[in-house]
């Protein structure tokens, strides 16, 4: 476990100008890009994966959006605030019968980015990270009710 922390620190330090963007969670052994709400598992990670993310258009655009505004959303709030935002957004889509594919619509993306100063996560990220959590939460509520 201690080796993972050193590896995470070394990886973060090796990314030029990126130290303030990344968090390491030793419990999940994941690096978290606070800027994009993107996770990298250290078990399967090398420097290339983190570099690819940092050089991706999505990451660059998110950094640009955050630099354009004086109010930052992810870095000035608790580390789970970004997660909470996307979790609630996914829940709202589900309860409103809005398909998660809405995040791929260019008009919706433009509107969202303009008024929230955040990059809209991909549909696959919403499905993998937040839809599963919402499903699990609902199953627990049903079990508690029964």
Image (cartoon, grey):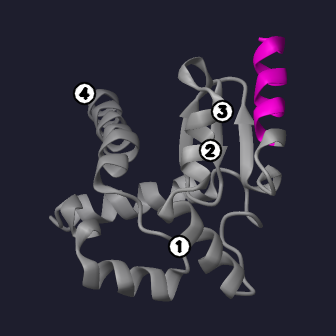
The span shown in magenta is 1-12
The answer to whether residue 136 is above or below residue 96 is above
Q: Is residue 89 left or right of residue 8?
A: left
Residue 26 percent across, percent down from the top left: 72, 25
Q: Quadrant of the C terminus?
A: top left
Q: Are marks 2 and 1 in contact (CB under 8 Å)?
A: no
The answer to whether residue 123 is above or below residue 24 is below
Q: Which residue lies under the disc numbered 3?
A: 47
Q: Are marks 2 and 3 in contact (CB under 8 Å)?
A: yes
Q: Which residue lies under the disc numbered 4?
A: 146
* Disc nearest the viewer among 3 and 1: 3
Sort mark 4 into few (<14), some (14-19) or many (20+) by Cα contacts within 10 Å: few
- The verdict on residue 11 being magenta is yes
Q: Are marks 3 and 1 in contact (CB under 8 Å)?
A: no
Sort mark 3 into few (<14), some (14-19) or many (20+) by Cα contacts within 10 Å: some
The answer to whether residue 144 is above or below residue 75 is above
Residue 140 percent across, percent down from the top left: 35, 31
Query: Helix or strand or loop: what does disc 4 sit on?
Result: loop
Q: Residue at x 53, y 73 (%)?
A: 118
Q: Which residue lies under the disc numbered 1?
A: 118
Ranked by sequence position, the earlier of labels 3 and 1 is: 3
Mark 2–mark 1 Cα distance, whole angstroms, equals 21 Å
Query: Helix or strand or loop: what does disc 1 sit on?
Result: loop
Q: Are marks 4 and 3 in contact (CB under 8 Å)?
A: no
Q: Residue at x 56, y 58 (%)?
A: 36
Residue 47 percent across, percent down from the top left: 66, 33
Ranked by sequence position, the earlier of labels 4 and 2 is: 2
Sort mark 2 into few (<14), some (14-19) or many (20+) by Cα contacts within 10 Å: some
Picture disc at residue 54: none
Ranked by sequence position, the earlier of labels 4 and 3 is: 3
Q: Which residue lies under the disc numbered 2?
A: 51
């Amino acid at each position: 476990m201690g080796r993972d922390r050193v590896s995470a620190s070394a990886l973060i330090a090796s990314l030029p100008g990126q130290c303030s963007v990344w968090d390491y969670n030793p419990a999940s052994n994941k690096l978290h890009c606070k800027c994009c709400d993107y996770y990298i598992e250290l078990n399967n990670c090398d420097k290339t994966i983190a570099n690819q993310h940092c050089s991706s258009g999505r990451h660059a655009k998110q950094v640009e959006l955050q630099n354009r505004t004086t109010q930052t959303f992810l870095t000035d709030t608790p580390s789970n605030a970004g997660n909470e935002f996307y979790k609630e957004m996914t829940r709202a889509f589900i309860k409103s019968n809005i398909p998660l594919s809405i995040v791929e619509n260019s008009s919706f993306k433009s509107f969202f980015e303009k008024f929230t100063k955040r990059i809209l996560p991909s549909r696959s990220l919403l499905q993998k990270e937040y839809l599963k959590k919402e499903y699990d939460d609902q199953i627990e509520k049903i079990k508690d009710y029964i």
